[in-house]
Amino acid sequence: MDNVILETVVGLVFIFGIFAVVVSLLTELVARFIGLRGEYLLRGVRTLVDGQGQFRLSLGDLFARTAGRPAPKPGEPEDPFVTRLMQHPLICTSADKAQIPPNAGNARLTNAQRRRLPSYLSARSFARAVLDTVIPDAAGTTTMDQIRNALNELPDGHLRASLVGLANTAGNDVAGFRRSIEDWYDDHMARVSGWYKRHVRWISLVLGALLVLLFNLNVVQITQSLYTDQVLRGSVVTEATRAAQCGTKDPATCLRDMRDQIDRVRGAGLPIGWATVPGCAAPARCTWWEQRGLAAAHAGLASGLLSLLLVLVGWVLMILTLLPGARFWFDALSRLGSLRSTGPKPSPAAGSRPPAAT
């Protein structure tokens, strides 16, 4: 009995891992199509240097077909520093075809324009771009006194206040001032990365919900099938054992290596899809809900509602399995595989010593 339960858990974890990998790849495709990484990097830089920038992206912003004109809101700068900074050669060369869209950071961009934005900017490049834009030749022979004089000539605002504080901390060390800017950028981008992951998580949940409804991925039905069908359970566990090494690979490589395994598992008889349930095969007469397994066949209203509730619970649980991520499930699969195989190694006898390394 314990072995049956363990094999059922292994099969479920394997299916959860496959589902998470597929959704993560679809999410990455959507994020690339709408240029989400570049948009978050741009808004993160704007918030850092101008102190303004909202990370709430409406559907109109994400799928805009025409670029918006600069229209700063009350309290926002008319000419934000981010638009000049993004045109610096150290940043511009990271963009597609080395061309930053006009008014980047100060206007709504289209999907095509967002895809041209750089999706990554190193702290070193950012620091040098800031110094070259605010204080020419700051990376060369410029002294900290010259840097402070240049900072004092900047208009009052978020950038001036931030750089003055970093300059006061650096003392007379120009290299230390540059490193402070790099640390300032890294700390802020760590927060931007968290905002991006939270946004992408919602995209993953929406895509996961669509896949669950499209393919009728029900945790309750899958668990019942794995537990009661020994042949199906054995086939899924066999493929799960082969896929246990996916925990060390990226999702794209993992899915590419598992395509044949997914096809074999799909053909093994998992209750995936909207086929007619066996209890409603001809010549039995069932309603559409009963044929699809959404209600108990030839049962009363209470039993039908209970069956529908179990289906909804199974769908919701399947969507929630996306929250830990594919890496979590394949790491768990590796641990379960070790537990299922031979168990822990016996302890060495007292007084015994391992052979010396040669």
Image (cartoon, helix red, strand yellow):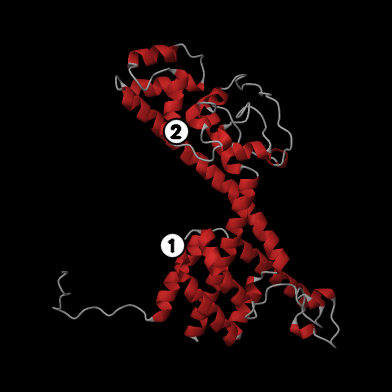
As rendered, which of 99 and 325 lies closer to the eye? 99
Q: Residues within 10 Å of mark 2 (few under 14, many from 20)?
A: many
For disc 2, the marked residue is 185
Which tag, 1 or 2, sits closer to the chain's start? 2
Question: How far separated are the C-alphas under marks 1 and 2?
Answer: 30 Å
Q: Is residue 247 left or right of residue 263?
A: left
Query: Tag 2: residue type?
Result: Tyr
Q: Percent position (x, y) of residue 64?
A: 72, 38
The label nearer to you, 1 versus 2, is: 1
Is 249 rendered above or below residue 346? Answer: above
As rendered, which of 256 and 299 lies closer to the eye? 256
Q: Is residue 136 left or right of residue 320?
A: left
Q: Which residue is found at the position 56% from the left and 58% from the top?
A: 323
Is 293 rendered above or below residue 96? Answer: below
Q: Which residue is found at the position 79% from the left and 81% from the top?
A: 297
Is 336 rendered above or below residue 31? Answer: below
Q: Which residue is found at the position 42% from the left and 34% from the top?
A: 123
Query: Tag 1: residue type?
Result: Thr
As rendered, which of 13 and 255 lies closer to the eye? 255
Q: Secondary structure at mark 1?
A: helix
Q: Percent position (x, y) of residue 49?
A: 51, 26
- In the rendered structure, find residue 248 and report the number of the disc placed on it: 1
Number of marks present in the image shown: 2
In which quadrant of the rendered image does the C terminus lie? bottom left
Q: Is residue 325 left or right of residue 285?
A: left
Q: Residues within 10 Å of mark 1 (few under 14, many from 20)?
A: few
